[in-house]
Image (cartoon, rainbow, N blue to C red):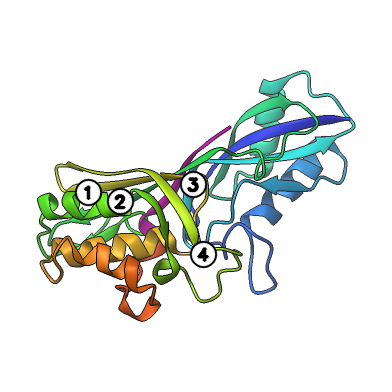
């Protein structure tokens, strides 16, 4: 028995998210079918995390078990990506791991990136890949505000009502913002995130950038622990699962 890790990138626009669901096509389902055809065996995969509908990934991680040893990585990647050629999904790497490796449970840190395009003109090339915000955002205030997320907090106000996590306590190890021309890139690092937590944090930071809220408002929302006090979550199209650390 062999345990393999795959690194995956995808555009989540046309999928119902990572996890299998009855109401549409899931990324997990498409990959399992491609792996099953490639290895000529029934393959099931464990993902590092469940991205929602419309959310993308630059470095999603998953693992699967196989009775066959994969000797030729080039051939494997070429074949599996052939079966994915009609999908906005690519398997970009394969690694042989120990049998106790689990893409989700072995993860030590997850990095999410959110991209805002701050301009008046509509999206063309980056349609469904960024959040268009036309009103000019105050980056200095957003940078001040994002620091309030760093550390261990109760993120009850920032989780979706459908979130199944047992505890709303999470630790944000790093959170930063950088501006490259018209793009505003927000990065968050944590061992794990609640459902819609990142999008909710970005939604609040947008309010700060628009001068609807002061930077200190973030601190008060964390203390209130009330979802109704949180800003509307940012749309999924700007969110990327960037990397998983083990």
Q: Are there few (<14), some (14-19), or many (20+) residues within 10 Å of tag 3?
A: many
Q: Are there few (<14), some (14-19), or many (20+) residues within 10 Å of tag 2?
A: many
Residue drawn at the location 66% of the way across and 29% of the way down: 78
- Residue that label 2 marks: 115
Q: Relative to the observer, which residue lies in front, 79 or 144?
A: 144
Lower sequence index among marks 1 and 2 = 2
Q: Relative to the observer, which residue lies in front, 193 or 179?
A: 193
Residue 57 circle label: 3
Q: Secondary structure at mark 4?
A: loop
Q: CA distance from mark 2 to mark 4?
A: 17 Å
Q: Position of residue 74 (x, y in %)?
A: 66, 21
Q: Position of residue 113 (x, y in %)?
A: 37, 47
Mark 4 in CB contact with mark 1 (< 8 angstroms): no
Q: Quadrant of the C terminus?
A: top right
Q: Is residue 227 left or right of residue 57?
A: left
**Image: 160 above or below 82:** below
Residue drawn at the location 73% of the way across and 26% of the way down: 97
Q: Relative to the observer, which residue lies in front, 108 or 62?
A: 108
Lower sequence index among marks 2 and 3 = 3
Q: CA distance from mark 3 to mark 1?
A: 18 Å
Mark 1 in CB contact with mark 2 (< 8 angstroms): yes
Q: Are there few (<14), some (14-19), or many (20+) residues within 10 Å of tag 4?
A: some
Q: Secondary structure at mark 3?
A: strand
Residue 205 magenta = no
Residue 53 circle label: 4
Q: Is residue 160 left or right of residue 143?
A: right
Q: Main secondary structure of the magenta part?
A: strand
């Amino acid at each position: 028995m062999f345990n393999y890790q795959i690194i995956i990138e995808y555009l989540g626009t046309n999928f119902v998210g990572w996890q299998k669901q009855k109401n549409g096509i899931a990324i997990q389902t498409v990959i399992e079918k491609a792996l099953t055809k490639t290895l000529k065996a029934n393959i099931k995969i464990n993902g590092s995390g469940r991205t929602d509908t419309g959310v993308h990934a630059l470095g999603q991680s998953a693992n699967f078990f196989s009775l066959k040893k994969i000797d030729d990585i080039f051939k494997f990647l070429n074949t599996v990506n052939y079966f994915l050629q009609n999908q906005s999904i690519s398997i970009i790497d394969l690694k042989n791991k120990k049998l106790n490796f689990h893409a989700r449970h072995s993860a030590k840190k997850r990095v999410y990136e959110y991209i805002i395009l701050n301009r008046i003109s509509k999206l063309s090339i980056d349609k469904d890949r960024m959040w268009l915000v036309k009103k000019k955002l105050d980056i200095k205030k957003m940078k001040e505000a994002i620091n309030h997320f760093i550390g261990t907090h109760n993120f009850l106000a920032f989780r979706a009502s459908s979130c199944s996590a047992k505890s709303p306590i999470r630790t944000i190890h790093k959170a930063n913002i950088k501006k490259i021309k018209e793009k505003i890139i927000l990065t968050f690092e944590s061992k794990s995130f609640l459902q819609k937590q990142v999008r909710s944090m970005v939604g609040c930071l947008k309010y700060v950038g628009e001068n609807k809220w002061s930077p200190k408002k973030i601190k008060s929302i964390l203390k209130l622990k009330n979802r109704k006090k949180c800003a509307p979550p940012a749309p999924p199209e700007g969110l990327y699962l960037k990397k998983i650390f083990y």
